[in-house]
Amino acid sequence: DMEQREVEKLSATLDALLLNPVFTALLAQRDRAGLLEATAPVLRELKHQHGIGLWTFIEPEPARTCFLRVHRPELSGDLVRLMALDAAIRTGVAASGIELDRTALAFRVVRPVVLKGRIQGYVELGEGIEGFLARLKRETGDDFALVMHKGFLEEGAWAASRGVGRNNWSDDPEVVTVEATSPDVLVPGAIGDV
């Protein structure tokens, strides 16, 4: 239920944001600086009020490269590999998922941006998993940890996704802790068979 509420919140917020013709026009003009200037204050408010901290504009096919990460503007030009993006391209409508990219593991909603009947690109709005785990703890009183097997990750990509956070790749030989509600939730080396 909490996951569904997150997706609905992100979808509704994204729909409302794309009603602003300035964002669509700046994307169509490929004005990265103007788009960042227009969107950065909005993202700060979304983060403060609703925990939404990821906003990305993606070039249309065949490029599928990041045009602008409002939350990390220094990272652009890379190929965006998200299943939600694949689904949005395939169906032409919004798609969602919990996915890891260069900046975070997050709930994500991706949808096409259309101007005058032509796809100008795709826009993604996301909320990091850490906010979800904190809310889950508040609702249940329990502590949680989310771990991933290293076999599904690349060490360099993991380090880049941590941003200014500590790179915890070496804490355990098999898994990496994505997020935990308490430092005592998971003892490295004692994870057992997940």
Image (spheres, grey):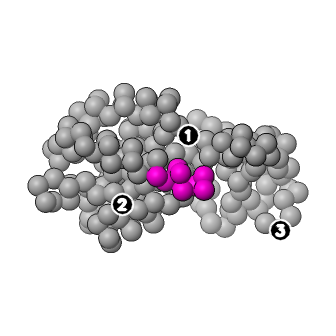
Question: Is residue 183 among the parts visible in the rendering?
Answer: yes
Which class describes the residues within 10 Å of circle 2: few (<14), some (14-19), or many (20+)?
Answer: many
Q: Earlier in the sequence, mark 2 or mark 1?
A: 2
* Most common SS among magenta residues: helix
Which mark is on residue 163? 1
Secondary structure state at the residue bearing disc 1: loop
Q: Which residue is mark 3?
A: 193
Q: Which residue is mark 2?
A: 94
How would you rate the neighbour count of disc 3 (Cα within 10 Å): few for under 14, some for 14-19, many for 20 or more? Answer: few
Q: CA distance from mark 2 to mark 1?
A: 27 Å
Front residue of this view, candidates 84 and 62 = 84
Q: Are marks 1 and 3 in contact (CB under 8 Å)?
A: no
Taking the magenta stretch, the answer to whether it contains residue 7 is yes
Q: Residue at x 48, y 39 (%)?
A: 53
Given residues 173 and 131, the one toward you in this image is: 131
Please state which amino acid type lies under the numbered disc 3: Asp
Query: Residue 113's x, y, as percent?
Result: 25, 54
The three-letter code of the residue at mark 2 reads Ala
* Magenta part of the chain: 1-8
Q: Using residue 115 as the reference point, say whether residue 100 is left or right of it.
A: right
